[in-house]
Image: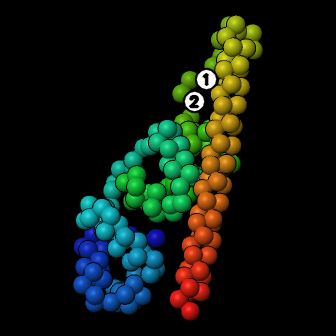
Amino acid sequence: MSKYSFELKIQVVQEYLDGKGGYDYLAKKFKIKCTSDVKKWVNIYKEFGTEGLVRKHKNNVYTVQFKLNAIELYQTSELSYREVANTLRINNPSLIINWMRRFREDGIEGLSRQKGRPPAMTKKMNDKSLKNQIPIENSSNYKDRIKELEIQVRTLQIENAFLKELRKLRKQEACEQIKQSQKLSLASEDNSN
């Protein structure tokens, strides 16, 4: 996406809100490549005000727990990615999309993995230091740690299954309510005739 100035974004949003044109018209008028950019700016302005349109030079760092909460909110509600982002005061819904993708592919490890290239080793280890190290498998805490992690994985699997079932039940309830309202509207039409 091209980088547009704050002033241009404000001008486009103001013209849209003043009713001087739609997304397509304003995109053409101001030579903005994507109509979706205009739509996104209007949405961000409505949700966050002018502060949301300011280009941030520092990236926010979100904790793994925050990312999990965002994923859970998306999975357990009928909110879109944009609505979840607005609820959590994030002006970029693609973050949640990426978190969902990484969580589905790699689980929690995918959310805790840092982006970018790993740092280069600062020290080279010599052979003597390698000989003095105790292999992880031989440490007394290794088996306990494995058991803890297995319990944690099982707990998360149960939680995930519960959330999936809860979402399924909510969808079924919504379908039943729609069917019920359709029956009521048909019954009221029959009674009126």
- Label number found at residue 179: none
Residue 80 placement, left or right of 143: left
The relative height of residue 96 versus residue 185 in the rendered view (above or below) is above
Q: Nearer the viewer, residue 82 or 52?
A: 82
In-front residue for pair 182/67:
182
Work out which residue is located at the far right of the displayed protein and give it: 137
The secondary structure type at the circle numbered 1 is loop
Q: Give residue 175's position: percent from left, percent from top.
A: 63, 66
Say which residue appears at 45% left-offset and 77% top-offset. 36
Mark 2: which amino acid? Met
Name the residue carrying label 1: 124
| Colour treatment of the image | rainbow
Judging from the image, what secondary structure is the residue with disc 2 in? loop
Q: Are marks 2 and 1 in contact (CB under 8 Å)?
A: yes
The reply to whether residue 114 is visible in this rendering is no
Q: In this orientation, does residue 35 appear?
A: yes
Q: Name the residue under label 2.
A: 121
Would residue 58 appear left or right of 108 to someone viewing this image?
Answer: left
As drawn, is 147 to the left or to the right of 65?
A: right
The type of residue carrying mark 1 is Lys
Q: Which quadrant holds residue 6?
A: bottom left
Pinpoint residue 9: horizontal percent, then vertical percent. Answer: 30, 74
Image point 37% across, 87% down: which residue? 22
